[in-house]
Image (cartoon, rainbow, N blue to C red):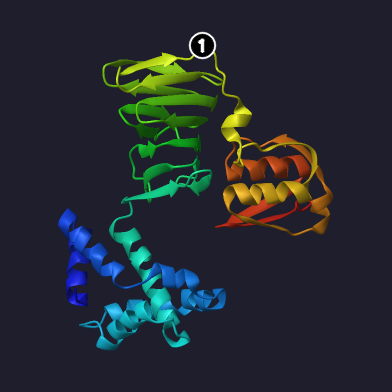
Amino acid sequence: MNNKELKTLIDKYLKGALSAEETVQLEQWLDAMADEQAFEALPEAEKEAARTQGYERLLARIDKTSQPAVVRRLFTSARSVRIAASVACLIIAGFLFKNSLLNVIAPHRLTAMTSTAGKIKKHILSDGSIVWLKGNSKLVFPVTFGSGSRTVTLQGEALFEVAKDAAHPFRIHCGTLTTTVLGTSFNIRSTGTETQVAVLTGKISLSAPQSEKIILLPNQQATYSEPAAAIAKDQNNSTSVHELTKGTEYDMAFNDVRMADVVPRIEKKFDVEIDLQDAGIRNNLITADFTDQSLKSTMEMISQALNLEFEIKGRAILLKLKKES
C-alpha cells in the first residue's frame, strides 16, 4: 500500500465508510512498518530519543506521494540482522506510528491479553478498571471503550475491580453467562462448562439464556452450569477473600503505616509514579482502607487525612503539603 492509498483509507474512515476488509488491509500495512520485538530489544536511551523525534519524522513522510525505497530497505534489513544504531529511530518511529494511527482509525478495536499457568497478569482498562488475569486465561476487550456499555469477554479466571460509572454498565461475557456491574469488585472463574462468580464489594447481576436473572451482594457466590443453562446461588461460600485476591494488589488497607511504605503499594497497583514534594511526608502515618477505590479517590483520601494536595499528570502524581490560606 502506498501513501496515497493510505490517505484514501483515512478519508473513508472519517466519513464513516471504512469497511472491515479495508480495516484489515490498513492494519496489515501498518504491521509491515515496524518490528515490535526489535523495538523492545533496544536500549532505553534510543527508545526515548525516538519518542521525541521519530514520530514527527514519520508523519512528515506520509505527506509524500510514495514511500521511499530506502525506508523499505532499512526496515527489511532490520528484520534479518542485528539493529544498527542508524536505523533504530526509524524502527521505533514505525512501531509508535502504527499504534498511534490505529488509535485514530479504530479506537474501539478489540485486543486481547493472556496469562500463563501459575502467573497473574494485571491490566488497567481505558476506563480505569483493573483486571488481574489468572493462570491460563484470556481477556478480550476494546482498546478504548465506546459511548455504550463497557463489554469484555473472559476465558478462564480473573479478579475485576470495576471503575464506577452508572451511565455505562460493565459487562463480562463468559460463555453464555453475562455478568453486569456498575462499579464493584468480584472474581470470575470459568472452566468452560461451569462458571463461578464471587462478589467482594458492590452488587452484580448474572444472566443467561433460559435462566432467571440472579443478583449477588458482597460475600455471595453463584455458579452457572453451561450444559444445564442454570444459575444457582452457593449456600456455602467457601472461597475466602484472601484466596481470591492472592497475588494481586487488591488489598489496600493500612493501619498506622508510614507513607514511605504506602506509596510503593499505590504505585504498583495503578502503574504510576508518585513524587513526594516534601520529604517529611514519607514519615507520616496513615490508617485507611483504599481497597476498591480509584486512583483519584485514593489520592483524595490521603490528601484529606494528611492535609496534603495532589496533582495528577498522566502517570505522574505530585503530592505536597497544602498551602496555608
Tell whether 241 sits left or right of 224.
Answer: right
Figure check: 60 above or below 143: below
Figure check: 281 above or below 162: below
Q: Front-most of 221 and 239?
A: 239
Q: Front-most of 73 and 283?
A: 73
The quarter of the picture where residue 148 lies is: top left
| Residue name at image x 53 percent, y 74 percent | 48
Looking at the rendered image, the quarter that the N terminus falls into is bottom left
Can residue 55 be seen at all in this image of the molecule? Answer: no
| Residue name at image x 64 percent, y 36 percent | 251
- x and y percent of residue 112 in the render? 37, 49
Most distant residue in the top direction? 235
Specify the amino acid type for callout 1.
Answer: Gln
| Residue name at image x 37 percent, y 65 percent | 100
The quarter of the picture where residue 141 lies is: top left
Residue tagged by mark 1?
235
Q: Secondary structure at mark 1?
A: loop
The quarter of the picture where residue 301 lies is: top right
Most distant residue in the front direction? 117
Q: Front-most of 311 and 222?
A: 222
Tell whether 20 sits left or right of 109.
Answer: left
